[in-house]
């Protein structure tokens, strides 16, 4: 499909990340996002789901032109070989996705989770924050904390961790300096969809490496 063309409803895309094929549903519709959540919840659960999570943010002008407000434009989940790229757009946020974000049976792993959850209203007030592990926590567990801190300051955390820990991921797209500056609008371009899939899958892969190392250390 050409870059920038609109995927049909329930569009299923196939990507190979880390030598494994993943299937991604790309949508801006709440009902289709809810279908993905329902399918994942029907899969066998062993203690906890390790879910890779990533976000893309966009700048919005505040009312009255008083400044710039950053908002989550799209959310990307990865569990096993299933990926959801959910562009928020103008539709009301999917209640099923919000419930999934609050599910204590999930352990979310990704970058900037605290800021994203706060912006989405997850874990506010008396509500317990969902279990989560930031990529910097993964770096500490895997013994590359110093490198990760430097990469984080340069905005290169994903490619640095993927190169140091996974070693089987194509880093070209992750290192593209221009892609992150493009506006995230529907329909997403092919490159934006692939970046969303890669960051979510890498987060999930890093979570498995971190938990494997914890088992060795314990």
Image (cartoon, rainbow, N blue to C red):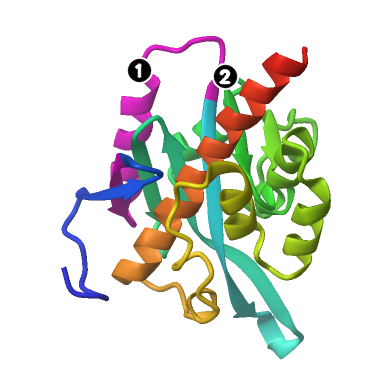
> Residue at horizontal 46%, vertical 42%?
77
Res 167 label: none
How far is mark 1 from mark 2, CA to CA? 13 Å
Task: Give the x, y percent position of residue 46.
Answer: 49, 10
State the residue position of label 1. 43
Q: Is mark 1 on a helix, strand or loop?
A: loop
- The percent coordinates of residue 4 (x first, y second) are 26, 76
Q: Residues within 10 Å of mark 1 (few under 14, many from 20)?
A: few
45 lies above or below 24 = above
The magenta span reads 21-49
Q: In which quarter of the view is residue 203 placed?
A: top right
| Residue holding disc 2 | 105
Residue 45 forms part of the magenta stretch:
yes
In depth, the one of 136 and 69 nearer the eye is 136
Residue at 78% in and 67% down? 153
Compared to residue 177, the image places residue 137 above or below, namely above
Q: Residue at x 54, y 51 (%)?
A: 54
């Amino acid at each position: 499909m050409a870059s920038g063309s609109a995927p049909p409803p329930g569009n299923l895309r196939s990507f190979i990340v880390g030598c494994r094929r993943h299937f991604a549903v790309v949508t801006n519709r709440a009902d289709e996002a809810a279908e993905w959540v329902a399918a994942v919840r029907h899969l066998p659960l062993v203690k906890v789901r390790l879910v890779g999570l990533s976000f893309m943010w966009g700048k919005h002008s505040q009312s009255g032109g008083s400044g710039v407000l950053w908002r989550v434009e799209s959310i990307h989940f990865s569990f096993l070989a299933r990926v959801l790229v959910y562009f928020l757009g103008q539709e009301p946020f999917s209640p099923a996705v919000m419930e999934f974000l609050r599910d204590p049976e999930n352990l979310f792993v990704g970058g900037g989770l605290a800021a994203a959850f706060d912006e989405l209203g997850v874990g506010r007030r008396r509500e317990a924050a969902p279990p989560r592990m930031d990529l910097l926590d993964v770096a500490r567990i895997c013994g590359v904390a110093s490198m990760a801190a430097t990469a984080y300051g340069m905005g290169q955390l994903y490619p640095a961790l993927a190169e140091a820990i996974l070693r089987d991921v194509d880093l070209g797209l992750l290192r593209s300096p221009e892609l992150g500056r493009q506006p995230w609008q529907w329909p997403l371009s092919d490159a934006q969809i692939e970046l969303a899939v890669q960051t979510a899958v890498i987060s999930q892969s890093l979570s498995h490496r971190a938990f494997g190392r914890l088992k060795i250390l314990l």
